């Protein structure tokens, strides 16, 4: 069992230092070439692997271009185009509705504020944060996905359980300059080492400062 540093700010600083060293090229793993493609890829990525999303988007982005293309696509046609993605029917509805809004209300441009983005169908804070950070270079929050949720709790950084509450808690202890990278580092570490089932504590750069290390070893 590792011993987390106290206060939490020190634990966060140590975790960041080590993970920056471990994953120097950490960044978003979705493929996109403009803000609209980014938004669509992030909507599709909910409860689905980035790998599968990239595969589907390769064809999708060849077929549809501006927001009008998506907004005017028949529901069945768009759903069919993304049918290997989880919840594809709902996601097709979200994309058509969000793109209709972008075309009609935002002059065809993906909005650049949290409130306008979260007004779009299928867009919550997590998706909005990703689009703001990578589409607009605006960092006003921390993206909390399943990896961030799992690792911050295991590392003793937060005791919160819901993504919104975890984000608010993290904003108090993670330096603002690290908000964007924090998520990428957690995702990389979550995929490589601190997996949901059978994490590899023996080979983990954070084991000595992780209070969960023993309970996850076998």
Image (spheres, helix red, strand yellow):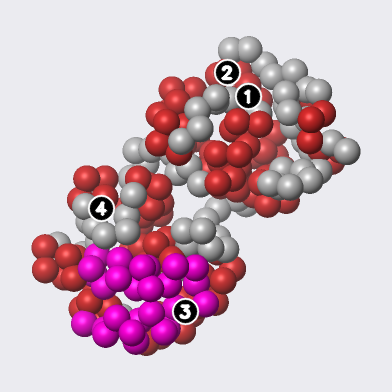
In the picture of the structure, the residue carrying the numbered disc 1 is: 156
In the picture of the structure, the residue carrying the numbered disc 2 is: 8
Residue at image x 64%, y 49%? 188
Residue 53 included in the magenta stretch of the image: no
Q: Give the range drawn in magenta.
A: 72-99
Residue 87 included in the magenta stretch of the image: yes
**Placement of 2 over or under 25, stated as above or below:** above
Query: Distance between the Cα atoms at labels 3 and 1?
Result: 38 Å
Give the mark nearer the N terminus: 3 vs 4: 3
- 195 with respect to 176 (left or right): right
Residue 34 rendering spot, x and y as whole percentages: 36, 68
- 202 with respect to 86 (left or right): right
Please name which of the two marks, 3 or 4, marks the residue nearer to the observer.
3
Q: Residues within 10 Å of mark 3 (few under 14, many from 20)?
A: some
Query: Distance between the Cα atoms at labels 1 and 2?
Result: 8 Å
Query: Distance between the Cα atoms at labels 3 and 2?
Result: 43 Å
**Do the numbered discs 3 and 4 sit on residues whose CB atoms are within 8 Å?**
no
Give the mark nearer the N terminus: 4 vs 2: 2
Q: Does residue 11 appear anywhere in the picture?
A: yes
Q: Does residue 64 appear anywhere in the picture?
A: no
- Identify which residue, 65 or 40, lies in the foreground: 40
Pick the quarter of the image with the N terminus.
top right
Give the mark nearer the N terminus: 1 vs 2: 2
Give the mark nearer the N terminus: 3 vs 1: 3
In the picture of the structure, the residue carrying the numbered disc 4 is: 117
């Amino acid at each position: 069992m590792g011993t987390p540093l106290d206060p939490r700010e020190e634990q966060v600083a140590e975790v960041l230092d080590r993970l920056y060293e471990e994953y120097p090229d950490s960044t978003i793993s979705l493929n996109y070439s403009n803000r609209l493609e980014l938004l669509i890829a992030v909507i599709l990525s909910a409860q689905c692997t980035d790998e599968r999303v990239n595969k589907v988007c390769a064809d999708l982005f060849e077929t549809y271009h501006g927001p009008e293309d998506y907004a005017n696509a028949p529901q069945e046609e768009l759903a069919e185009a993304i049918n290997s993605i989880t919840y594809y029917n709902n996601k097709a509805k979200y994309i058509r509705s969000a793109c209709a809004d972008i075309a009609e209300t935002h002059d065809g441009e993906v909005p650049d504020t949290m409130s306008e983005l979260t007004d779009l169908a299928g867009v919550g804070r997590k998706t909005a944060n990703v689009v703001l950070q990578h589409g607009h270079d605006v960092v006003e929050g921390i993206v909390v996905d399943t990896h961030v949720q799992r690792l911050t709790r295991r590392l003793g950084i937060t005791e919160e359980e819901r993504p919104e509450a975890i984000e608010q808690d993290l904003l108090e202890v993670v330096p603002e300059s690290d908000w964007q990278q924090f998520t990428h580092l957690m995702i990389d570490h979550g995929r490589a080492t601190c997996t949901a089932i059978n994490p590899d504590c023996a080979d983990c750069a954070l084991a000595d400062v992780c209070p969960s290390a023993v309970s996850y070893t076998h």
